[in-house]
Image (cartoon, helix red, strand yellow):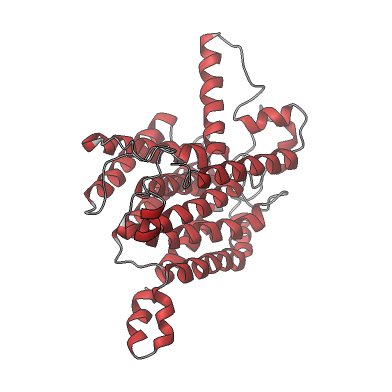
Amino acid sequence: MLYEFIYPLHVDFTFLNIFRYITFRTIYGGLTAFLICFIFGPIVIRKLSQLQIGQIIQTDGPQTHMGKQGTPTMGGILILFSIFITTLIWGNLSNHYVNILLLSLLLFGLIGFVDDYLMQIKKRNMGFTALGKFSIQVVFGLIIAYLIYLCPDFTTTLTIPFFKDISPDLGLFYIPFACLVIVGTSNAVNLTDGLDGLAIGPYIVASVTYMFFAYVSGHMEIADYLHVRHIASAGEISVICGTLAGAGMGFLWFNAHPAQVFMGDSGSIPLGGILGTIAVITKQEILLVIVGGLFVIEALSVIIQVSYFKLTKGKRIFRMAPLHHHFELKGWHESKVIVRFWIISITLALLSLGTLKIR
């Protein structure tokens, strides 16, 4: 909105030409998102406390978590508010990919908000059923995937990391594939959000990583040099990625151990959804397995645990799933688990960026 209002004035005021640069708007978008979270964070936390919207701790989890009982949750609304406002200020709203990303954030944010609302405000034992939540996610995922499929500069070929000459074309089958990526990422981030700052830290790392991928994809010369598929309108996604990272840092200020607020499903589900959507648009869908490797590991630990438990009629591989709880029960302090998992996510992000040259 600010971009569309100010940039046309560069004809008369040449210094406003700086608004045309994606790098400028990405940096200041990130700073704006950070400041919004930083300024409004205490207000949101205080309001959540007044409404008695507090974290419910399961008694079968690590006993060290019992002290978190009642900590304000649904803090994800702060992150979403920051992202929407910042995008309206610095984003190019005429870009179709920006609009799709905002829609993805809105739809998956609606799922997370309703789920939290049913538990926290209506005081139900649970929000959506697992099947109900997954079904709605699939429907919304298909909508987003179809809208991406309709974009004129988008192709249905896959980018295979490390191999520049292998690009299978999925055609219409790309839609369910993209849906799988979006829904899978949404749930993976949601499962990782179990310790103070555990999910948002790696999420910031993943956002910054895709900020580079988006910029490279949208820049014809760089994309050609690195043998990356050029998507003319994808460069603008860098601004969104910068916004996600900035909002994440602002939230982490209050979510760092010991957390003053948790994001809840209101934050983790839409943040995962938009990250998956970004991976699809930038044609780095498969690479998301590396970029968001920590989220993948956490999700797989749950799948493996549940499957093994059913097959062996009660036996477990991990002491508890998701994986971060396993290490807690082994005696690791919460902070040690968090920082080490952050280190893993940074290492995987660097590995994924290295694929730009290994092709």
Residue 10 position in % (x across, y down): 36, 85
Question: Residue farthest to the bottom?
Answer: 12
Horizontal placement of 169 versus 265: left or right?
left
| Visible residue check, residue 74 | no
**Nearer the observer, 111 or 95:** 95
Horizontal placement of 90 versus 151: left or right?
right
Question: Residue farthest to the front?
Answer: 225
Residue at image point 50% right, 63% down: 82
Place residue 170 in its image quadrant: top left
Residue 34 position in % (x across, y down): 57, 64
Residue 333 position in % (x across, y down): 77, 37
Q: Looking at the figure, which quarter contains the C terminus?
A: top left
Q: Looking at the figure, which quarter contains the N terminus?
A: bottom left
What number of labels is visible? Answer: 0
**Nearer the observer, 178 or 82:** 178
Residue at image point 65% right, 33% down: 324
Q: Is residue 44 above or below residue 105?
A: below
Residue at image point 61% right, 51% down: 52
| Visible residue check, residue 234 | yes
Place residue 95 in its image quadrant: bottom left
Q: Is residue 216 above or below residue 91?
A: above
